[in-house]
Amino acid sequence: MNPFTRQIRRAAGLRRNAKLFLLMTATSALGSGVFILFLNLFVLARGNDTAFLGLLMSTMSLSALLLALPMGVLVDRAGRKRAMVIGGLCSLIGTLLLALSPVDWPLVAAAVFYGSGNALFMSAGPAFMAENATDDERATLFSLQSGLSMLMAFLGSALGGPLPSLFGRLLNVPAESATAYRATLLTAEGVMAFSLIPLLMIREERAPAPERGRPAFSLRSFPLRRDVLALLAPELVLGLGAGLLIPYLNVFFKQRFRIPDALLGLTFAVSQLLMGAATLLAPVLAERWGKVRTVVFTQLASLPFLMALGFVPVLPVAIGAFWLRAMLMNMAGPLYTAFAMERVREEERGTVGAMIGVTWSVGQGIGPGISGLVQRSFGFPPLFLTTGTTYLMASLLLLALFGRAEPRMATRSESLAM
């Protein structure tokens, strides 16, 4: 049986809970794709300035960052399904407040609700997937979840594009008015609300109590847990490198190539589509090489395309390199998360998943500020070189820490089978 057929059979044979989780993910991403596309435009159309918009965006991100660890502990104590339901309700409350509030100050509270909901999903999702798939299915499920999120967000952006014009005609208001954007956001929220239906249909089994003699995971023991620190270190280096450059690639295209907005939007939309498709292929490579080696290989393979994007002054080459870099780098994420969930005990997965998210966010928080100063003084070339170096360091660190972990596991599994 060829690897592609095997992956299709594994996807078809996933447990009921896993399939419901994927349905929830797809529905939520479809609505989120529309919501995120027009949220900024709605805030500006209602009369707010870019400084207030920046405050809202920062509040969402900082809320998710600051609440991630407490939410991770909540996930491990309250259960995965209950945490995801609470997270979904928090996100819906936040989006409704953002769309309906007639004054400004509740929008900041709405951003906190939205960020806390994201923090709960960031903690509960990986733990839930790890516990509702076998060892053979885990890479398939994680990659399907990530790939479906990207593909459905792309579909949401494509389908949502005409909605403001449609509501403008129906409500007899300008297409770029706050009223038309508000109706579009409420439509997106309706789609997101439907994602709670498959989530409520999930039947969660009660997690087993910690083994006697093994203390439960505690944030106090975090600095002493070398196994957890080893999982976090590559993510910190990778997140810092990504934060230096990736949020500014649209600015790079505009400054370097004077690319028109229509082509810029198409370039990034195709990138998202290709990332989703590539993520679905990742389990095929993981089955052949193992999760860690696949992550290291795809990250290293992306480096030549990163350098071509930064230093080849030909627009078609830059766009092709941009697409290939994005495909290769984003194949790795779900596989590493699946691997990390396998390395810790079941009752720790929500907290450790939150820690991985926080570590990535720390790098993403530090990088953009440094990048702005570098751009002002030196332009983009040092950023491409630094980001490439951090990607290389993260890959080599991951290989040094875990390069032999999966072969040992495979050997042990084979001996048990014999």
Image (cartoon, rainbow, N blue to C red):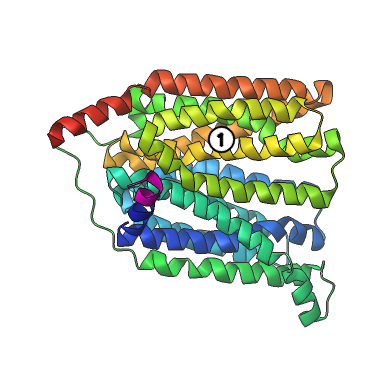
Identity of the residue drawn at 54% across and 49% down: 277
**Prevailing secondary structure of the magenta residues:** helix
Height in image: 407 above or below 350? above
Verify whether residue 220 appears in magenta. Answer: no
Based on the displayed image, in which of its 4 quarters is residue 399 positioned?
top left
Image quadrant for the C terminus? Answer: top left
| Label total for image | 1
Based on the displayed image, in which of its 4 quarters is residue 411 positioned?
top left
Verify whether residue 2 appears in magenta. Answer: yes
Q: Position of residue 171 (x, y in %)?
A: 78, 80
Left or right: 388 with respect to 70? right
Amino acid type of the residue tagged 1 in the rendering: Met
**Around disc 1, counting alpha carbons within 10 Å, would you say few (fewer than 14), some (14 to 19), or many (20 or more)?**
many
> Foreground: 8 or 111?
8
> Foreground: 51 or 417?
417
Kindly tell me whether residue 214 is visible in this rendering. Answer: no
Kindly tell me whether residue 356 is visible in this rendering. Answer: yes
Identity of the residue drawn at 33% across and 60% down: 17
Q: In the rendered structure, which segment of residues is drawn in magenta?
A: 1-7
User: Which residue, given by chain and number where applicable, does mark 1 sit on?
Assistant: 329
Identity of the residue drawn at 81% across and 52% down: 262
Q: Position of residue 226 (x, y in %)?
A: 35, 22
Identity of the residue drawn at 66% across and 60% down: 157
